[in-house]
Image (spheres, helix red, strand yellow):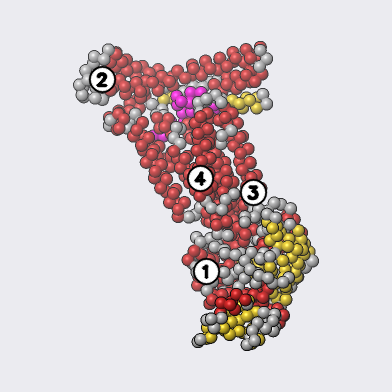
Amino acid sequence: MVKLILFEWRKHFLKIPVMAAVLLFSILNVAKIYSVYEGNSLLSKNVTGPLWKELYWDMYKDFGGTITDEKIRKLMAIYRPLEQRTADLTASTTYRNADTYLANVYEDFHFFRWCYVNPMKYAYDYEAYAHGVASAARDNIAFYQSVGNAYESRKNAAIAELFEGRAITSFSYTEMYQHYVQYDFSAFLALLICLYGFMSVFLTEKETEMDALLLTTEAGGAATVRAKLMASALFACLVCFWFWLVDFAAFSAIFGSWEAASSPLYALESFIHASINVSLGQYAALSAVVKTAGIVVLGLAFLLISCFFRNALIPFIIGLFATFGCVYMAEASMGSGRVWLKAINPFVLVVNRELFRKAEFVSLLGYPLPSYMAALLFAAVWGAVFLGGIAIFVRKNAWRQGGRRRVTMDL
Amino acid sequence: MKVTFKGISKRYKGKYALQDFSAELENGIYGLLGTNGAGKTTLINIFVGILKSDSGQVLIDGVDARSLGVNFLSRIGYLPQFPQFYKNFKVIEFLRYMCVLKGIPAEQGEKRAKELLEIVNLSDAAGKKIGALSGGMRQRVGIVQAMLNNPDILILDEPTAGLDPQERIRFRNLIAKFSENRTVLLATHIVSDIEFIANQVILLKNGRLLKQDTPQALVGGIAGKVWEVAATDETIDEKLNRLKVSNMMRDRHEIRLRVIDDEKPDARAVNVLPNLEDVFLYYFEEGAQW
């Protein structure tokens, strides 16, 4: 089987066009990440000028790490006067005042507000907020029990357990992760490469008239189909792994830090209601695995579609439109309360922040199942359906298994 | 080794591609001759299991191929019609892959592949990409892959299609070389492919078996029915319309026609010795009797 997988790999993926696509898309991906930084980061020259970055890392020596009362007092000692001086908008705007860190007092005020005060305030307040959520959930448990709603009662118990004891104890530079968790371009590129690569997996045999020859050999039937599926899954995993590696390396290098890896996921404001208690570093790994699973499931769909055709163009177009359909469905359900609609779409695994940024549940036989688990279960079902479809529709030899199985013949 | 086809039938959209085909094959070369659409490829596809027949059986030494399953596949070598193989594979790489598919141990397969490449005179091309080979070389690679597992039955579907005359002769000789102690079924519509190498010829027309016999017997069967008739530019059109002409040759001012007819077609017609091409024309021209 290993040899068959290696040959399938060699046949379909170890080709110059595929390798070139991976290389070119990687370059494009890095360029895109750079444009994300240049267009959005508070520390980029384009957004705030050259001085913010330098000042940020100078100040970070003082304010980074564990949040202490002393650090807060020191920060507020800088920030409060700035706030007062700029409140009535009469402060001097003269460029480069001697008593300012940056160009003028307004710029100082905005720098401290956006880079330190607001993020640190969010971190400092989070413990109380989480405690409030957990308390409210516990109150709800009692209420729903009193009205006999077992599902809502269980759901609130799960929420209370999730939010109990949450706190952000240290301040880190999370801007890189804020953009990293929102970044989907590389997933789209990986999906395109898989779509392109997978088109040839079954079609090459038809185009080269090798399908007939394969079927007349001992391992050319089911074993070859299994080898094709394994080689394809391996290819998808490697392409995804490569792109996630490029993403993380490029984000870390371009933003200049990845040190918030040990901060909790809810340290990002967009993940205030995160459905899992993991660190940002763990989330980066988990998200990569879930994205890969989503791409593998969509890849199986591409493979199934290609089984019905004799040339690559039509299944490629169908696969592309199916992907766009899934993207549209994911966009339409994003942010809405239609959790089932999110969960049944395998594409939601590819843009999985929607599953992890909110504590959402679906009812499974009256028990609250977190939406990410539901989405993973549905993806497994889709994967099984696609695999079953491939097993049914792929051509077989009539003499195998007594010739009882279906034989498809293209005329 | 004895292969028996028993009442094989196959219909596509209500039309018979193969109808109640029965034949017996033993060791030797069997030429499966028929026009395009006669059912040759359908028969071969059913034989190798790519296609399921609507009815009938294929027996190998009296045992149903269905019950042999994979064991049957290990006994056949098959060269399909118009195989392209994988253009980005080197010849030796492709043969290694075929060894894996056929369950041949790596060392044994490597040795066998090299031996066969030597026999078909392709040793120098072992490291070449398949995409860089000529049609004839590719067909020789095809026969090598079919022979890798040293099969009892070799099945070749239109193996000389697209080859030039020199390559066709070379390929024909190879098949003759490989036919020792095995059954070779060679489907073609080119008479010369099998005329000199086939031990038996199976004539297939509209999905039905027309004749199965040795080439000599088939040729002998139309002895006295092949004529040479002289014509001129003035009479040629009339003769072409009226007679079943297998060949026409201009010799100075005269045109000599090779005619197949049960009766003497012309007072000046001269009886000549028939060949297999005449047999083909005799049976496959419209109006031939069952």
Q: Position of residue A63 (x, y in %)?
A: 37, 24
Give the Cα separation between the discs numbered 2 and 1. Answer: 80 Å
Q: Amino acid type of disc 2?
A: Val
Which residue is disc 3 drawn over? A393
Disc count in the image?
Answer: 4
Are dots 3 and 2 in contact, CB under 8 Å?
no
Q: Quadrant of residue A163?
A: top right
Q: Determine the chain carrying the residue at label 2.
A: A
Establish whether labels 4 and 3 are both on one chain. Answer: yes
Are dots 2 and 1 in contact, CB under 8 Å?
no
Chain part drawn in magenta: A256-276
Q: Is residue A265 magenta?
A: yes
Q: Secondary structure at mark 4?
A: helix
Give the Cα separation between the discs numbered 3 and 1. Answer: 32 Å
Q: Residue A105 has which mark?
A: 2
Q: Residue A317 has which mark?
A: 4
Are dots 2 and 4 in contact, CB under 8 Å?
no
Query: Could you say which is closer to the camera, residue A159 or residue B93?
Result: B93
Q: Is residue B234 magenta?
A: no
Query: Could you say which is closer to the camera, residue A10 or residue B166?
Result: B166
Q: Determine the chain carrying the residue at label 1.
A: B
Q: Amino acid type of disc 4?
A: Ile
Residue, x 68% and y 26% (percent of image)?
Answer: A365
Dividing the image into 4 quarters, which one contains the C terminus of chain A? bottom right
Residue, x 38% and y 18% (percent of image)?
Answer: A72
Which residue is disc 1 drawn over? B135
- Relative to B177, does residue B139 appear above or below in the rendering? above
Q: Position of residue B263 (x, y in %)?
A: 69, 81
Q: Secondary structure at mark 1?
A: helix
Give the Cα separation between the discs numbered 3 and 2. Answer: 70 Å
How many C-alpha atoms fall within 10 Å of the one at disc 2: few (<14), some, or many (≥20)?
Answer: many
